[in-house]
Image: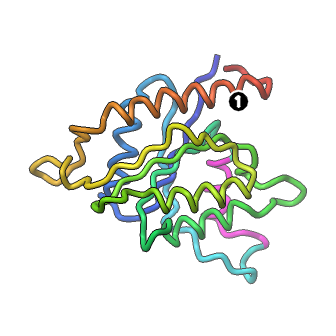
Amino acid sequence: MRPIKILAIVGSLRKDSYNRQLALLAKEIVGDRAEFEILDYSDVPLLNQDIENPPPEPVRRVREAVKSADGIWFFTPEYNHFFPGVLKNLLDWLSLPVGKEAPAIVKKPAAISGTTIGMHATACAQDHLVTLISYLDMDVMNKPRLTIPYIQEQLDSEGRVTLSKSRRYLERQADAFLAFVRKRVGDAGHEA
C-alpha cells in the first residue's frame, strides 16, 4: 500500500510566513501517516499568453507536483479580505489544460487553513478561495476549515508559531483531511 501524498500550497512567499509555519506544524502532525510536501512556486512567472505554450519550466514543475499529489492543503493569509495575488496566479496557471489532459487540479481533494494577526483570521480569503477552487472543479473539504486569529498570541520568544491555543484544531483538521483524501483515493480505484 502506498502512502497518500499531501501537497501544501502556502499563499505567502515569505520564507518565515505564519502560514508557512502553520503548514510545517501540519506536516509534523501528519507525521508518517502521509507524504507531506510544501510546494515552492516562488519562481512561477505571472500568467501571460505569450509564454503559455510551451509553459515555462517552473509551471511544468508545479503542475507535475500537483498532478502527483492525492490532496492539496492550502494555507493562506488574507490580504484586503482576499487571498494573495501570488496564489491566484498559481491557480490560474494550474487551471489551464495541458494538451488534451484536464488541468492538474481537477477533482483534487482540497483543505484550507489560514492564520493572520487580525481578528477575522482568514475567513473572507477562504470563502473567496473556496469559490475559485470549486469553480475549478476541486473536491473541497468544507468542514472543518481552520481560521486562526491573532496569531501573535501563539508565538514563542523567537517569533515562531507554537499554536499553544489552537493545535487541537489543526490536529482535528489533519485527521479529517487524511480521511477525506483516503476515501477519494479509494473511491478512484487506487490503493488507499
Q: Which residue lies furthest to the bottom in this view?
A: 50
The span shown in magenta is 53-66
Q: In which quarter of the image is residue 71?
A: top right
Q: Give the camera-side residue of 156 and 5.
A: 156
Q: Where's residue 16, x and y in %?
A: 29, 58
| Residue 74 to residue 143: above or below | below
**Which residue: 33% across, 60% down?**
15
**Rendered-image quadrant of the N terminus:** top right
94 relative to 19 in the view: left or right: right
The residue where tag 1 is placed is 184
Q: Where's residue 187, x and y in %?
A: 76, 25
**Rendered-image quadrant of the C terminus:** top right
Magenta segment: does it hold 50?
no
Q: For the stretch drawn in magenta, what is the main secondary structure?
A: helix
Q: Where's residue 100, x and y in %?
A: 90, 56
SS state under label 1 = helix
**Which residue: 70% across, 30% down?**
184
Magenta segment: does it hold 60?
yes
